[in-house]
Image (spheres, grey):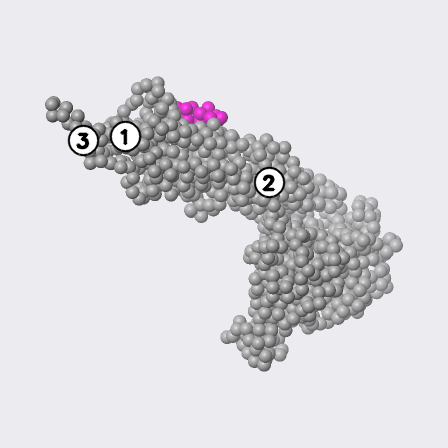
Amino acid sequence: MARIWTGLAAAFVLACAWISVGCAGELQRSDLERFFPPPCILGEKDDVLPIWPIFKQNGTADELVAYVFESVDLAPIPGFSGTPLDLLVALAPEGDFLDVKVLSHHEPVFVDGLGPEPLFDFVRQYAGKSLKQSIRVGPPQGGGGGDGAAAVVNGVAKATASVRIVNESLLAAGLAVARAKLGFAEGRDPSRAATLRADVFERLDWASLAARGYVRHYVVTNEESEAPFAGTNAEGLDPEVRARPSDPFIDLWVGALDAPVVGRNLLDDATFARLISDLDGRHALIVISTGRLSFAGDDFVAGATPARLAMRQGGAPVEIRDFAWRKPFILTDMPQGDVSVLTIKALAGWDPASPADFSIRATREKGQILPERISHDFVFPFSVPLDLLALARPESAKGFRAVWLERKADIVILTASLSVLSLSLALQKIVTSSSFRFAIFRRAFLAFTLVFIGWYAQAQLSVVTLIGLARAARGAAGFAFLLYDPPSLLLWTFTLVTMLIWGRGTFCGWLCPFGALQEFVGDFARGLRLPQWRISTAIETRLRGLKYVALALVLGATLASSALADQLAEIEPFKTAITLTFVRSLPFVLYAVGLLAVGLFIYKFFCRYLCPLGAAFALVGLARRWDWIARRVECGDPCQLCRAKCRYNAIEPSGSIIYHECFQCMDCVVIHNDRRQCVPLIRADRRLSPLRQRKAAAL
Amino acid sequence: MTRLGVTRRGALHLALGALAGAAGAPSKTTRAQAQVFRRVGIAFGTTVSITLEAADKQMADAAFAAGFTEIRAIDRLASLTRPDSEVFRLNREGFLDRPDSALVEMLHIAEAMHVATAGAFDITIQPLWLAFDAAARRGTWPSEAEIQALRERIDQGLLQVAPDRIAFAKPGMMITLNSLARGLAADRVAAALARTGIVNAFFDTDVLGAIGKRPDGAHWRALTHNPRLPEGSFGVADVTGCLATSGDYQYFWSADYSRNHIIDPRRGVSPSHFSSVSVLAKTGLTADALSTAAFLLDPDQAARILKSHGAEALFVDKAGSVTRTAGFPAVGPG
């Protein structure tokens, strides 16, 4: 019998093999020339980034019309299969997307079922959109559009999370090119940077500005300046260290001058307005130095980057430049020293909401002719107080944060239902006290699981995620893809935790939409009094082994090839039955319906014998902490009622529960607590009742 | 409101003539089996290209690889903005140990030009350029006093060049190799192509260069742009050796081009004689340096310095009238 099933599984694997899958790999010149035939001229590949310029001849000149790149080279964001998508992107020098094509993808929902067409349609929407806009994914049937500053692309139903990952990949890759080649978006995504609030103002003197952190102050004394040079050739070269140890070596003030509370206190209102208009959306920092080591000094060039001063944020340099601002400052108690107004070159080179660092370089020289120079960078943290910041608008937020915000309602409902479930399992005695009411509760919850979790929230957990995790664990990709699907992540977390408390049954018996569907099919069969095929214990044991074989095959294929693993994962009918609600090509629908049909005669056939995800959960569930299903000494010997009633064959003849096969239908718990069903209880009641005792004696 | 303008630096482009439409795809030529290939790239902030005649695609690819490697190396060395550029490091630190030989080569030419032009040609002009550019972007212009203060740190004589160390004698100095690097790149490309067996080629590193002849046996020719008409030209001229152009229209800070990227360090203003000077010389480095030098001088001095270097030139003065030295090829319809 087991051999037959193994054979069937193998046949299924072979049947899947015809499903074609796109191929990945770096494009060569000849490939790109095919994508961009004359009159496009494919230029010489860039020497720093994996990007290619495309030219067109305009008169006698070669005009740069686009940069072309593969998204996977610049932003390998893993999709739901764990493998990054690869998009071919043509980006105009002004930041407009000219063309986006899908080179390869393994997104489960697009591999088959929906088919790749919706994905191709989705990426086609990017042509004409600009990286300078904030591009976000809207609802599937939305009107798209947006305005100059924001653009909306229509999402794809049933593939929301996948197309968000496409959006992320495109934007991240595009911005990387924009930063390097197009001269904008340096540092970060413009739409995610915070802005300074224009409405915070208060008349303050310098001391108060400093006290509130609106201007930051950094001091390094002469004595402290010696420490970094200790042990070098420059040790002890500065006579001031000994002469005036506590005098400041560095005395530096830094503040955001374009924040009105700083700027309008330092400048008169007309001058401040002029500054803001001159800045044209850029940020300005005021830097004042009164110490011996100034950022200015002899080598200071107006309009240039101060040679000794550097600013960094998130590990990347922020390009600062003297703004050559020479208007007088009006604040009387301002420190007197070298003053510079610095601007940050790109519009969004600096995110004021994130911490940054300033550093000043101190250089000592030893020797007269060709002196040896020894330098040290003194680093100071710089941040803007929160009350001055307007954080990026949530509706323009991108990435997984936006997904979480958008699915707030789903998350709340799911969290509430999971709480109800945990509570019910914890208080099982009370919940199961009435077998009728419990039956109603269980059917209601399963209906919720099927309709809300499965069909609506699209949160059917799947072995595909395990494949993704396996790839991520091997370092082929990251784990971030989980964050794009909040309901699934919530369920995964809940399932893992409950697995350690109650075993795999909490997911398999309560939260798996396909499982719920099968249970309804089983109830239907029972209603029709269809004959049920009772399977002998020996065969049952072998059949149960099949799912572990399926799991091993799927995970083993992950090591061998992505495509094979994707195909093997089709042993799960989840995508067909739940994700795509049976709207899929015929072989897949036949397979899913066939499994359900078998389920009419063999209760929950797929769950018990074939499900690789269930197999994985059963293995993890071995770590379960306690045997929570109450048993009596009479269970198994002599009473076999629960065992006979268990539709999963998950009770041993000895009466003990096989937890890794238990789906927590609670039938045996209900029986155990029911004075009218549990045989040992009935017997005990008889013994206790005087009338019954007399009757027994009479017998 | 000051108008800012940037146009392509080169005034002369490859006149495609017989090659029109030969973008990327090889075209049949009159010589047996030889094909013409063309490759375009980006360097020096502009478009660069190599057109060559090769026996097959493999040979062409090898030549392109060698040529673009040279262009990239010089671009990286001389970039004012790339942190890994030697010029960037020199400007930031004030000194540079163990400079690349190409950098030293350019600095030696710069020294000779500085002397020959009595200080008009000066690669330490960069602080003034930066100040002008920053001011123009804000719609202002530095005052006379500010310009004078900046001129304190502009003197190529204060640039100390030794094979193992380059240093500024004064703090705050900066150099620019924008009048030399493209020319040197052209020379390096010529050598690289010759190494890979290419006999006939035309290349544009923003300085134009030719080796050999066109596939039809004629000289390579270039279009001479009219500096006052972005799409206009005076016609085409034969090119042998290298051709470099300096013009006021290439980067300017005032609508009348009077404030432009070529600045005379002795007075802190842009010179007023020419709107463009195109120089034809044996090497790209000489052509590039001479075109800037001649632009900075008055017509008589310009003619003398060109003669002493055996170079020919086409001058367009501010009024738009065109003159050329005796040896400069005729400009005519292509």
Residue A4: quadrant of the picture: top left
**Disc 3 or 1, which lies upstream in sequence?**
1
**Disc 2 or 1, which lies upstream in sequence?**
2
**Above/below status of A556 relative to A184:** above
CA gap, disc 3 and disc 1: 16 Å
Write down the region rendered in magenta.
A582-594
Question: What residue sits 37% from the left and 30% below the top?
Answer: A442
Q: Which residue was labeled with disc 3?
A: A688
- x, y (%) of residue A698? 11, 23
Identified by mark 3, the residue type is: Leu
CA gap, disc 2 and disc 3: 71 Å
Contact (Cβ within 8 Å) of mark 2 with mark 3: no
Most foreground residue, A81 or A241: A241
User: Could you classify mark 3 by the number of other residues whose Cα lies within 10 Å: few (under 14), some (14-19), or many (20 or more)?
Assistant: few
Q: Secondary structure at mark 2?
A: strand
Question: What residue sits 47% from the left and 42% below the top?
Answer: A482
Identified by mark 2, the residue type is: Arg
Q: Which residue was labeled with disc 2?
A: A136
Name the main secondary structure of what is drawn in magenta: helix
Per the rendering, the mark at residue A191 is: none
Residue B254 visible to the viewer: yes
Identified by mark 1, the residue type is: Asp
Most foreground residue, B26 or B278: B278
A64 to the left or right of B223 = left
